[in-house]
Every structure is written in C-alpha cells, then in structure tokens.
Image (spheres, rainbow, N blue to C red):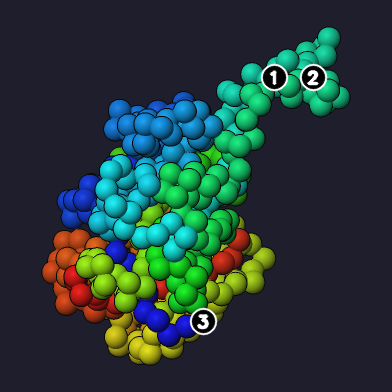
C-alpha cells in the first residue's frame, strides 16, 4: 500500500457550470451560482433559493455518445450530472475511453475502476404522483391495497432503475467501459472523499491503474428539500434576499445553508502509471483518514474531537506536521454547530495555526451539493495547487487539507500535495 496515487483529471459540476474553469472564475470574482429555484416553485418554502444548474446550459443528450442516448430516458437528475462530470473528467485527464469517441483506448477497460458517492435519491414527485392518484378510493383517499394491486402498474416498467443510488456508477462504467472494481458510497457530504479513499486503496493494491471517483447529488426537488427543512439545516430566506449573502460560513450570524446540486468526478491514477503515459500530475493524495462522530444530533452537529482525530491521522499517514498545511478547504456550510465542529477540529489538530491558515470557502458559491460536495472541495483544492493560489491571492502551496463532516457523522480529512504539474 505504498504506491503513490495522483489526481490527473478534475471536473466539478455545479450551478456555475461544468468543469473547473467556470467555478474557479466565480470564486475569484466572488460570484455565486445560488439563485431563485426553477425546477419547482420555491416561494412557499423557507428558502426559495438553490444552487441550480440552469436548464439552458445543460443537456445530457448532447454529452453522451449517440449510441447511448436512449438510456437517458432512465437517468434521473443525479445520474445525468454524474455522467456529464465523468465525460469532462476524462477529457481533463487526457484519457480516451469507450465514451470519448474515436481513438485508441488509453487504459485497458479491466484496469479502470469507478467509485462514486451518491444520495438516497428521491423520486420525481410528478412522476410518482401521476401513479398515486390512480389508487384513490370512492372518498378520494389513497388506498394502499389498490396501490399494491393496480396503481403501481401505472409507473413505467423501468421506473425503479432511475432512482437506485448505484445507477450513477452504473451508467458511468457502461459509458466508459470501466471493468475494474466499482462501488457506491452513500454517506452524505463525506461520500465523495470516502469514494476517493476506496479508489485509492484499489489502485494501491494493484487492482486497477486508474479510477473515476467522486460524488454527485441533486436534492433540489420537493421531497428532498422538505426533508432538509425538517432537519433544520436550511436557512430561512425571502425572495427579496441577496443570494450571495445567504450562506455565511464560520460567521457569528450564520443561520443555515442552501441546497445545491452537483459534485464532481476526478481521475485518480497510480503515480507510476500517470508518468508512463505522460499524464498531467495535478496533485498527489498524500494522506486520508475517516472517523465517526458520536453525537445526539448528527443532523446539525459535528464532533470537534472526531474531526480533529481525522485530521491528525491524515497528517500522520502523509508524514506531515501541522506546520506543513498551507490552506484548508472546509465544508463551511453555514450551519453553526457544524462550522463550530470543523473549526474546533482544526484547532485540536493544527493548534494555534488553525485560525491563520487560509480557508477556501465554496458553499456560498455552489450551495451544499450533499454527496457531491466533497468532490467539489477536492477539485478546488487540486486547482489551488495547480494555480499556486487560492481564489483572490497567490500563495506558495505544497499541501492543502480538505475536510468534511457529514450529516450522519462521518468525517474525512484528505491532504493533497503539490504534483509535477502544479
């Protein structure tokens, strides 16, 4: 397990667009992708805003290979975003795959793995509701027995295949013919980093030369948004509020987060393999650790001690000390107790330097992308190393720390180090 693993391709997909460039420009300019919701009427909700990818900027049928367009009929929004991000990631890494069109395949299919974090996908309300209304009794009430016998037949035959969490990795592996180890992780905001951890171990033990890894989720639908409001994680806002000022990470007046959609796919390779093929070494995954918070309320709280343990273990695995960390990319959701847990964990692990290390905050620009949020953080951290700057300032960056503290209590700490291309 001593082989080094490199990041050779990054492709976040957020409300700001596909790929790192639109996201990076927005972070540099201080712009946000959070805006009034279009996918459903949000004015009756506590927060009418979301980090939503504009409909006119995204069409999955234009992204998938022509022979695969029929399959888009059984793709929910989460799957569409994952497939789009994977396509952009392979391009960014300079790979030719089965889904890239003509040309020799860069990596043999049986040497390419895939691990993608996903959420527990909510069904489309209109699609499900159209079937549910067919199972009303004579008083207009829903009849469960009729639903089980007749009503459920009014769903399309392949309905369930749209909403299984493993469908993200399923479609990506089919499009790019990834025949190596594949898996799905469903651990909220930590899903992406945990997927990267699994990809890293697969590569280190020699089961694959490269993996598509990361996570994607869209909770911008009625059921998913309602659940987050019930959990007390969403900020209360009115339609007249400035969307750029809603999410205030680590601020004394932080009042909650805003949901976003997206995430990202990264290409992970063994360093030796990437060097042999002449790939761009954007960053090295130096250390990675995960812990579990034990708390009475894992919906809106995080354990500083547990987060600190993850950071300390990641440092030890990277053979680094607290003084070696040059920047931090935290979740920074704007949920007071979670922000406090992150900050407390940093202070436990990094000591007096914790408050002076530059922080790169992405949630005010993207919203909380949930299972995909860690992938956005990882992509931005990688770009910081490549550009040798954090948004708004040039820096001498050797090691960047990425931390997540998810709903459910799973915490991750990932240390990315400067690569040959940085």
> Please, what secondary structure does the residue beneath circle 3 have?
helix
Compared across the picture, whether 337 is left or right of 323 comes to right
Mark closer to the observer (2, 3): 2
Whole-percent x, y for residue 270 in the image: 37, 73
Which residue shows up at 40% across the image and 68% down it? 209
Q: Is residue 311 above or below residue 106?
A: below
Quadrant of the image containing the C terminus: bottom left
Whole-percent x, y for residue 330 in the image: 38, 66
Quickly name the residue at label 2: 150
Quickly name the residue at label 3: 309
Compared across the picture, whether 62 is left or right of 159 comes to left
Q: Which residue sits furthest top?
A: 138
Which residue shows up at 32% across the image and 45% down it? 100
> Please, what secondary structure does the residue beneath circle 1 have?
helix
Q: Quadrant of residue 2?
A: bottom left
Could you tell me if residue 330 is visible in this image?
no
| CB within 8 Å, label 2 to label 3 | no
- Disc 2/disc 3 C-alpha distance (Å): 53 Å
> Please, what secondary structure does the residue beneath circle 2 have?
loop
Within 10 Å of the Cα at label 3, are there few (<14), some (14-19), or many (20+) other Cα atoms? many
- Disc 1/disc 3 C-alpha distance (Å): 51 Å
Q: Which residue sits furthest left?
A: 394
Quickly name the residue at label 1: 154
- Disc 2/disc 1 C-alpha distance (Å): 8 Å
Q: Is residue 335 above or below residue 3?
A: above
| CB within 8 Å, label 2 to label 1 | yes
| CB within 8 Å, label 1 to label 3 | no
Compared across the picture, whether 321 is left or right of 422 comes to right
Mark closer to the observer (1, 3): 1
């Amino acid at each position: 397990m001593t082989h080094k693993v490199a990041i050779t391709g990054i492709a976040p997909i957020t409300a700001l667009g596909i790929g790192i460039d639109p996201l990076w420009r927005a972070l540099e300019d201080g712009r946000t992708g959070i805006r009034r919701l279009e996918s459903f009427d949000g004015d009756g909700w506590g927060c009418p805003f979301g980090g939503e990818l504009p409909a006119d900027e995204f069409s999955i049928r234009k992204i998938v290979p022509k022979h695969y367009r029929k399959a888009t009929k059984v793709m929910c929004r989460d799957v569409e975003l994952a497939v789009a991000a994977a396509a952009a990631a392979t391009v960014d890494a300079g790979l030719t795959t089965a889904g890239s069109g003509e040309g020799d395949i860069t990596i043999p299919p049986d040497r390419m793995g895939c691990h993608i974090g996903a959420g527990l996908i909510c069904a489309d309300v209109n699609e499900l509701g159209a079937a549910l209304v067919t199972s009303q009794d004579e008083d207009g009430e829903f009849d469960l027995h009729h639903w089980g016998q007749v009503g459920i037949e009014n769903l399309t035959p392949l309905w369930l295949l749209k909403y299984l969490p493993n469908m993200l990795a399923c479609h990506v592996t089919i499009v790019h013919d990834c025949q190596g180890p594949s898996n799905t992780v469903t651990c909220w905001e930590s899903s992406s980093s945990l997927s990267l951890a699994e990809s890293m171990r697969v590569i280190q033990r020699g089961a694959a030369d490269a993996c598509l890894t990361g996570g994607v989720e869209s909770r911008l639908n009625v059921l998913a948004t309602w659940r987050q409001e019930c959990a007390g994680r969403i900020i209360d806002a009115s339609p007249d509020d400035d969307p750029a000022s809603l999410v205030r990470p680590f601020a004394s007046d932080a009042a909650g987060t805003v949901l976003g959609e997206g995430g990202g796919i990264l290409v992970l390779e063994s360093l030796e393999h990437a060097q042999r093929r002449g790939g761009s070494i954007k960053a090295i995954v130096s250390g990675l650790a995960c812990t579990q918070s034990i708390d009475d309320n894992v919906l809106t709280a995080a354990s500083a001690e547990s987060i600190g343990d993850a950071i300390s273990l990641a440092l030890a695995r990277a053979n680094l000390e607290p003084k070696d960390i040059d920047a931090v990319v935290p979740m920074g959701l704007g949920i007071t107790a979670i922000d406090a847990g992150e900050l407390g964990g940093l202070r436990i692990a990094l000591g007096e330097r914790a408050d002076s290390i530059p922080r790169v905050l992405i949630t005010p620009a993207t919203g909380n992308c949930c299972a995909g949020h860690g992938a956005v953080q990882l992509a931005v951290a990688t770009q910081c190393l490549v550009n040798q700057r954090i948004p708004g300032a040039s820096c001498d960056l050797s090691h960047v720390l990425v931390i997540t503290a998810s709903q459910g209590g799973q915490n991750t700490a990932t240390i990315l180090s400067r690569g040959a291309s940085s």
